[in-house]
Image: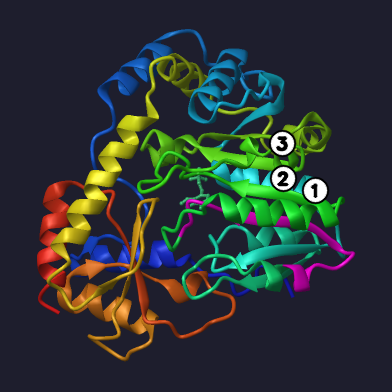
Amino acid sequence: MSITKGLGPSIFSQMTQLAEEVGAINLAQGFPNMPIDQKLKDCIAVAAQSEQHQYSPFQGIPELRQQISDLIFRSCGVRVSSSEILVTTGATQAIFTTVQAMVKSGDEVILLDPCYDCYELPAILVGAKPVYAPLNEDYLPNWDLIEDLMTPRTRLIMINSPHNPSGRVWQEKEYRALEHLLIKYPEVVLLSDEVYEYLAFDHPHYSVRQSPILKERSVVVASFGKSLQATGWKIGYLSAPERLLRNILQVHQFLVFSVNSFLQKGIANYLEEFNPRNVNDDCRMRRDFFTSALQSSKLILLPCEGTYFQTVDYSMVSSAKDVDFARQLARDVGVASIPISVFNHDFRDLKHLRFCFAKTEETLSEATQRLCTL
Ligand SMILES: Cc1ncc(COP(=O)(O)O)c(C=O)c1O
């Protein structure tokens, strides 16, 4: 039987399709519906008119890698050499490529549960075993439990903060615990998915690059889809010490070879002036608008410190399973969301739904009015 047999359309596609069928407001899939920065469009338009249309160097054009290096320095004060950066077709490819390069059949990969849905399959495809470490009820990690799950076969740990689906943002103490763990397991590599790095609202995002211990052991994944609010472009990057990057480059070369050349050029020009603070302020304002409009609803708002997502507990409204309630909500109330259980391996029947608030004020206003009728 094929490994992928039984994999249907993702819940994101299903809920988006349902939203279209029933005319619901789509707060399910995580994409902004606001216009992107005009300056960014201008930079891309200029690049599209240039002669930057052939294959680019397979690691990414030097101007873009240099701009990324400078951006990392500006945002977390750590210098990552442009030779340690690989431009990818989005974070999904960066994750897939890293797993192919780092993990072999029989290895074990620790996934914190719930987690983004593209982490598991790459491990399964190489014949590795995903090992799930449930997060605590507050969606923060349980380090004792994670350590109990470590074995001599553990090769990779995948972490994600700011966290999709919960919106939690790890504070420094989590990274100190991670350092202690990794020191005990010198062969283990860390994949840190930091696609929402600029969307930490209540306390700063801590990049694993800021820890000299973790930086040496980590592949850090980023997405221009998220940081430039243009999820459809599917372009991102990863950074890793050369020792790890070497193998990743080999896989990348044969999987993708190189990424869209004029997008790289346009983004490189834009990054010179890019200030992540603006994206952060913009999304924080949307989070605040959404949460304050839901204060009078029967939905209980769980802590949301970052990302595009607010998770709510609907147990005061219904005892239905989250997948059923999400469908009912889209059909009867006209708001589409994502049931959290789809991110869970160890299904705990939490009455939690995830809403994307990276939407215009008009969309959020209409959606929250509908949710307040519950
Ligand atoms: C946590 C997380 N990682 C990775 C991705 C994929 O990013 P990209 O669209 O750049 O492939 C997403 C997209 O929603 C995400 O939420």
Q: Is residue 159 magenta?
A: yes
Q: Which mark is residue 102?
A: 1
Q: Is residue 140 above or below residue 86?
A: below
Q: CA distance from mark 3 to mark 1?
A: 21 Å
CB of mark 3 within 8 Å of CB of mark 1? no
| Amino acid carrying mark 1 in the image | Met
**What is the quadrant of the C terminus in the image?**
bottom left
Which class describes the residues within 10 Å of circle 3: few (<14), some (14-19), or many (20+)? few
User: In the structure shown, which secondary structural element does the residue marked by tag 3 occupy?
Assistant: helix
The residue at which mark 2 appears reads as: 98
Number of dots carrying numbers: 3
Question: Residue shown at 53%/82% (left/top)?
Answer: 347
Magenta segment: 147-164
Label 2: state its secondary structure.
Answer: helix
- Dot 3 amino acid type: Pro
| 321, 42: nearer the viewer | 321
